[in-house]
């Protein structure tokens, strides 16, 4: 299973054909996202009152498997955070939570445009990250 991060979903929804094509080529199995990404996307929707865009995002998210932040994800995220702190690397906590969910659910690859996930991969060694431009 491959996980789409918030940055990639935003690019797809904005009509970035290059990113959409890359994701389709990388998609050899099921695609998923997380409840954390859902939170990030809808925070902006509710803040800006973007009702039409909210409907589009709901449809898109329903087309993906939705992974939740649970006890196992919390433990995995804490392990990742511990490794980053030991290495004195700073990463956005939201990205650590998403990586924890990925780790707890056996995600093969995180597809993202966010370099923080590469830092997590380099320090923790997992999950595999495909960094798009």
Image: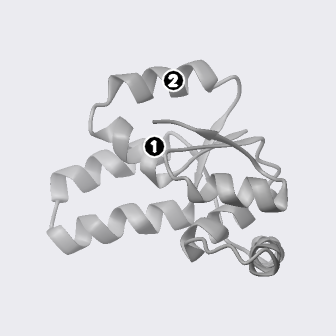
> Is residue 102 in sight in this rendering?
no
Along the viewing direction, whichever of 62 and 45 lies nearer the viewer: 45
State left or right for residue 44 relative to residue 120: left
Disc 1 to disc 2: CB gap under 8 Å: no
At x 76% / y 70%, what residue is drawn? 73
- The local crowd at label 2, few if under 14, some if 14 to 19, many if 20 or more residues have their Cα within 10 Å, is few
Measured in 3D between alpha carbons, the distance from the residue under mark 1 to the one under mark 2, in whole angstroms, is: 10 Å
Numbered badge on residue 38:
none
**Residue 1, picture quadrant:** top right
Work out whether 19 lies above or below 42.
above
Q: Which residue is mark 1?
A: 8
Q: Residue furthest front?
A: 88
At x 27% / y 39%, what residue is drawn? 14
State left or right for residue 102 relative to residue 57: right
Which numbered disc flags the more N-terminal residue, 1 or 2? 1
Work out whether 76 lies above or below 85.
above
Along the viewing direction, whichever of 50 and 26 lies nearer the viewer: 26
The residue tagged with tag 2: helix, strand or loop? helix
Q: Which residue is mark 2?
A: 22
At x 50% / y 39%, what residue is drawn? 63
Q: Position of residue 42 (x, y in %)?
A: 34, 65
At x 49% / y 61%, what residue is drawn? 37
């Amino acid at each position: 299973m491959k996980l789409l991060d918030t940055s990639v979903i935003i690019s797809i929804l904005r009509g970035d054909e290059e990113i959409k094509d890359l994701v389709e080529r990388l998609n050899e199995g099921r695609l998923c996202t997380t409840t954390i990404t859902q939170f990030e996307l809808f925070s902006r929707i509710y803040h800006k009152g973007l009702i039409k865009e909210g409907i589009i995002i709901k449809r898109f998210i329903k087309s993906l498997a939705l992974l939740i932040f649970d006890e196992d994800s919390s433990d995995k995220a804490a392990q990742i955070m511990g490794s980053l702190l030991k290495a004195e690397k700073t990463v956005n906590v939201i990205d650590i939570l998403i990586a924890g969910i990925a780790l707890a659910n056996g995600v093969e690859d995180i597809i993202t445009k966010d370099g923080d996930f590469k830092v997590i991969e380099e320090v923790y060694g997992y999950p595999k990250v495909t960094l798009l431009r």
